[in-house]
Image: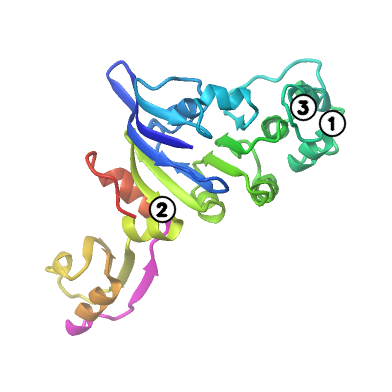
Amino acid sequence: MSFAGAVKTFGTIRAVDGADLEINRGETVALLGRNGAGKSTTISLLLGLDAPDAGRVRLFGRAPEEAVRAGLVGAMLQEGRPIPRVTVRELVAFVASTYPDPLPVDEALDMAGLGEHGARRVDKLSGGQAQRVRFAVALAGNPELIVLDEPTAALDVEARRAFWDSMRAYARRGNTVLFSTHYLEEADDNADRIVVIDRGRIVADGSSELIKRSGGGSLVSFDLAGRSTEGLSLLPGVSSVEIRGDRASLRTDDSDATVIALAELNAIRGLAVAPATLEDAFLTLTSHASLSEKAAV
């Protein structure tokens, strides 16, 4: 799967602005970004629902719409209305029948956590169950790539855990998974690779650990004990300083150098060093990302 200089505009807005991206077979990739960052448009280009204004998008060496018709791609999108008077099994069986090499219907239902609900009408399901039906439909064709747009948005904690158990089982078969989510812990726990989009551009691309190191650094905090805060922003590695009451928190790209400098100032009372979380890195990347550069991770 590849994007080469892909651009998509809507009026004066560049929803996708020169995207270059390669995803290999077997990877599980999370697509992160704020609302309006360009995630859904990127997915639409990938699925052939929109055509790029410039650049190129390819799936398995083909145009997206050709790969979809060949049954190589399954998708679970946010939008969709339940079909009245159709059971879960009937719907999944119908979708499966349109593909050349579908999953057995029972297998698709079990993977989606719907094994006991096959006889129920789709329009009588709860929101979480309806979301699982969308997942089963995406799996029905036995695709090599599955694309998921906010797949757990309507699921409770237990259902989310079951969903990702199923997704990991699907990925272990050597299949490729691309998903967008607002739950950063899902990306942290389940993705081999994370791609961050901001204002239509890819601003970071790498493993969770690399993203954290490149975008967030570490947090060094200590008690001021009445000391002045002057000069803290000039310490080695420090990128930002936050003071809350009598405690200072320093965001740093080199926690060892920062701590050594604090020790030399005899300012390490109540010292704590914590690694950056994915949320820290995400907020840094999407708040201060350069529009002209992609983060090197």
**For this view, does 57 lie left or right of residue 111?**
left
In magenta stretch: residue 276: yes
Q: Decide: few, some or many residues near mark 2? Use Cα within 10 Å; few <14, some 14-19, many ≥20.
A: some
- Say if 132 sits above or below 24 in the image: above
Q: Nearer the viewer, mark 1 or mark 2?
A: 2
Q: Identify residue type, mark 3.
A: Val
- The image quadrant where one finds the C terminus is bottom left
Say which of 156 and 61 sits in front: 61
Q: Decide: few, some or many residues near mark 3? Use Cα within 10 Å; few <14, some 14-19, many ≥20.
A: many
Give the residue pinned by disc 1: 118
Q: Nearer the viewer, mark 3 or mark 1?
A: 3
Give the residue pinned by disc 2: 206
Q: Disc 1 and disc 2: Cα gap in Å? A: 39 Å
Disc 1 element: loop
Q: Disc 2 and disc 3: Cα gap in Å? A: 35 Å
- Say if 149 sits above or below 168 in the image: above
Among the 4 quarters of the image, the one containing residue 34: top left
Say which of 14 and 99 sits in front: 99
Q: Disc 3 and disc 1: Cα gap in Å? A: 9 Å
Give the residue pinned by disc 3: 92
Q: x%, y% of residue 26?
A: 58, 48
Residue 229: in sight, yes or no? Answer: no
Among the 4 quarters of the image, the one containing residue 8: top left
Q: x%, y% of residue 91?
A: 77, 23
Q: Are marks 3 and 1 in contact (CB under 8 Å)?
A: yes
